[in-house]
């Protein structure tokens, strides 16, 4: 089994003037509706599809997908056009992001998905983040739980470290504690169960203490630490900073059963400005077109 996590950067279907159109992999790069913007948007999403096709994962955990309709359109039109084996089982449930950036899963085998977007701290016996309402949802987006036989995946996208860095750290710490509590409630013995936490943890490399430590310290194994140090990056900022916000945290049982399983970063769709030695797809530009501002991470678990 090959699993993948990929922040696809604002995948959203719109219908201006009754015409179907997917937003490109952008935040605020280009004026919406301009001729250049439309061309770049389409080029971006063709590259997103090509990255997923080359990854050829059995299970894809995606972040920043607007809704199930956007995912289905992208799958049925752009992914289908690559000729790759498709992912007929899909889930993208409503989350808490005010801009509509949800988490999603596509798979080549059936699964049932459970959303935890509506959980409040008291539901899990947790204290709210400092200076926040007690009835505020724990997850900024969601924690989507899906099971594939003996393996259970928890797909997440934690709070970004802005606009208030300290407040965002507290939100991510609460999210990490909540995922740990969900795992502890799901399994009689989390140490021997087979589970993975996949997604964009938005965990800055220069924080003195990791907000996501509850998922790692004495609990799970950060598989990205198995990557060569120079290869441990999946995101680049225009000020030259590289980071690895994208994560694969495994149960001790998964880490022990697959001691040679090392995540691989697929940067072939990132803008050339990010640098690195990885070749890019031929249509990738310096900044755009690109597949995303993130690389995809893939992991092979043989025998599942």
Image (cartoon, grey):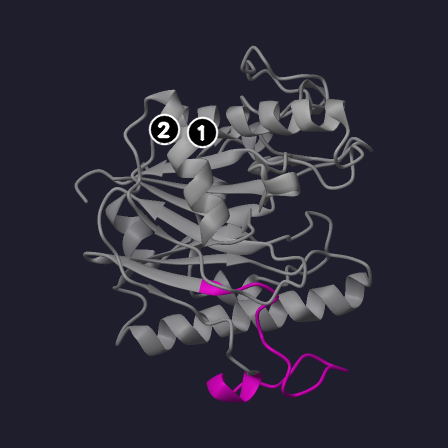
Answer left or right for 204 relative to 79.
Answer: right
Residue 252 locus on image (x, y percent): 33, 57
Task: Give the spatial CA distance, label 1 vs label 2.
Answer: 5 Å
Disc number placed over residue 259 in the picture, else none:
none
> From which residue to which does the magenta span run?
121-143
Q: Position of residue 176 (x, y in %)?
A: 54, 67
- Mark 1 surroundings: few (<14), some (14-19) or many (≥20) residues within 10 A: some
Quarter of the image for residue 35 reads top right
**Residue contact at pointers 1 and 2, CB within 8 angstroms:** yes
132 left or right, relative to 258: right
Residue matched to label 2:
80
Q: Quadrant of residue 153?
A: bottom left
- Secondary element under disc 2, as helix, strand or loop, is helix
For mark 1, give the secondary structure.
helix
| Location of residue 292 by image quarter | top right
Asked if residue 259 is positioned above or below residue 221 in the image, the reply reads above
- Within 10 Å of disc 2 (Cα), the crowding (few <14, some 14-19, many 20+) is some
Residue placed at 30% from the left, 42% from the top? 259
Q: Nearer the viewer, residue 244 or 209?
A: 244
Residue 83 position within the rendered picture, expressed as x and y whole percent measured from the top left: 32, 21
Q: Residue at x 68, y 16 (%)?
A: 285
Between 249 and 284, the one lying in front of the other is 284
Q: Quadrant of the C terminus?
A: top left
Residue 248 seen in this snapshot: no
Q: Quadrant of the N terminus?
A: top left
The answer to whether residue 167 is seen in the rendering is: yes
Q: Which residue is mark 1?
A: 78
| Magenta segment includes 161 | no
């Amino acid at each position: 089994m090959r699993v993948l996590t990929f922040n696809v950067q604002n995948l959203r279907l719109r219908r201006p003037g009754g015409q179907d159109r997917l937003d490109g992999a952008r935040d605020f790069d280009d004026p919406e509706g301009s001729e250049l913007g439309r061309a770049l948007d389409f080029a971006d999403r063709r590259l997103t599809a090509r990255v997923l096709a080359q990854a050829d994962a059995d299970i894809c955990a995606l972040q920043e997908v607007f809704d199930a309709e956007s995912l289905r359109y992208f799958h049925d039109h752009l992914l289908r056009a690559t000729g790759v084996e498709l992912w007929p089982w899909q889930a993208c449930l409503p989350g808490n992001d005010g801009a509509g950036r949800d988490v999603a899963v596509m798979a080549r085998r059936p699964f049932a998905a459970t959303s935890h977007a509506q959980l409040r701290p008291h539901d899990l016996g947790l204290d709210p983040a400092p200076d926040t309402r007690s009835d505020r949802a724990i997850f900024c987006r969601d924690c989507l739980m899906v099971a594939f036989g003996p393996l259970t995946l928890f797909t997440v996208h934690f709070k970004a470290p802005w606009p208030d860095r300290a407040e965002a750290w507290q939100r991510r710490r609460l999210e990490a504690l909540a995922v740990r509590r969900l795992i502890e409630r799901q399994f009689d013995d989390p140490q021997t169960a087979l589970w993975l936490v996949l997604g964009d943890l938005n965990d800055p490399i220069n924080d003195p203490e990791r907000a996501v430590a509850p998922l790692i310290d004495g609990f799970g194994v950060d598989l990205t630490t198995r990557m060569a140090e120079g290869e441990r990056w999946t995101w680049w900022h225009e000020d030259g900073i590289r980071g690895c916000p994208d994560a694969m945290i495994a149960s001790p049982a998964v880490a022990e059963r697959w001691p040679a399983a090392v995540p691989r970063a697929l940067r072939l769709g990132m803008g050339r400005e990010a640098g690195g030695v990885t070749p890019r797809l031929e249509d990738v530009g310096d900044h755009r077109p690109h597949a995303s501002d993130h690389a995809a991470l893939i992991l092979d678990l043989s025998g599942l």
